[in-house]
Amino acid sequence: MKIKIAPSILSADFARLGEEVALLERCGADYIHCDVMDGNFVPPITFGAQAVRAVRPHTKLPLDCHLMVLHPETHIEDFAKAGADLITVHAEACDLLELFKQIEGFGVKKSAVINPETDVERLFPAVDGGADMLLLMSVHPGWGGQKFIPETLKKIEALRNYCEKHGRPDLDIEVDGGITEANVKDVIAAGANVIVAGSAVFGSADPTQTIRKLRG
């Protein structure tokens, strides 16, 4: 499977967000990962649909919007109209299959995610329910720069095995949190193929080379 890199703009310079997003496209990124936090589901507040709308003209890359929010059903329409290409919702915050119907209704791809403390089995219905991607958090959501939780590797393996056994061997599995050049090969070997990276890319002196190395 193709390995795709999704740099998170949580680590970008927000004063130059349009320029940063355009740079990521030139450097070879595959997605722009947008970490949306509401101050309730997770303590920090980041940005909303307005920021997605603002960066949309600056890149042709898909905008991968991860909604770390309570009541995500109240935000789907705003993000879809702002230009999101894929919307990810938390199994802990909603009925996944109901939200999938809502997301599909706006012509946007749908993804589901779980936090580190949540059993991987919570994502299995999303595999059978037509998810376009699945996301595993490998740090506790809310802050960048955390260390990768090693137990995530077993979850990746279990999820990939389930996908293969249930007729979806090529389903994208995304992993977010603490991924660096030092551990990315283990993440890919476990079965992930979409890598979210924030500080690893934005803190690099050569983002193009870093993105290449993150492909494993």
Image (cartoon, rainbow, N blue to C red):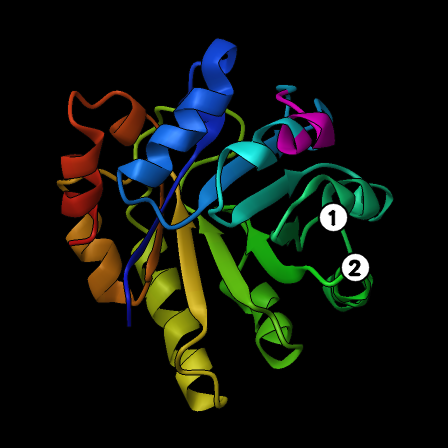
Q: Residue at x 65, y 19 (%)?
A: 45
Tell me if I can see residue 122 in this picture. Answer: yes
Side of 205 where 42 appears, left or right: right
Q: Measured along the vertical axis of the image, is residue 45 above or below residue 208? A: above
* Residue 148 spot, x, y in % from top left: 31, 39
Mark 2 Cα within 10 Å, few/some/many (few <14, many 20+)?
Answer: few
Whole-angstrom CA distance, mark 2 to mark 1, is: 6 Å
State the residue in front, 85 or 100.
85
Q: Amino acid at mark 2?
A: Phe
In what element is the residue under mark 1? helix
Q: Measured along the vertical axis of the image, is residue 16 above or below residue 204? A: above
Tell me if I can see residue 183 in this picture. Answer: no
Which quadrant of the view contains residue 172?
bottom left
* Residue 37 spot, x, y in % from top left: 64, 29
In what element is the residue under mark 2? loop
Mark seen at residue 106: 2
Q: Residue at x 65, y 23 (%)?
A: 47
In the picture of the structure, the residue carrying the numbered disc 1 is: 80
Which quadrant of the view contains residue 101?
bottom right
- The secondary structure that dominates the magenta segment is helix
Instruction: Read off the magenta span.
Output: 46-53
Mark seen at residue 212: none
Q: Residue at x 28, y 72 (%)?
A: 1
CB of mark 2 within 8 Å of CB of mark 1? yes
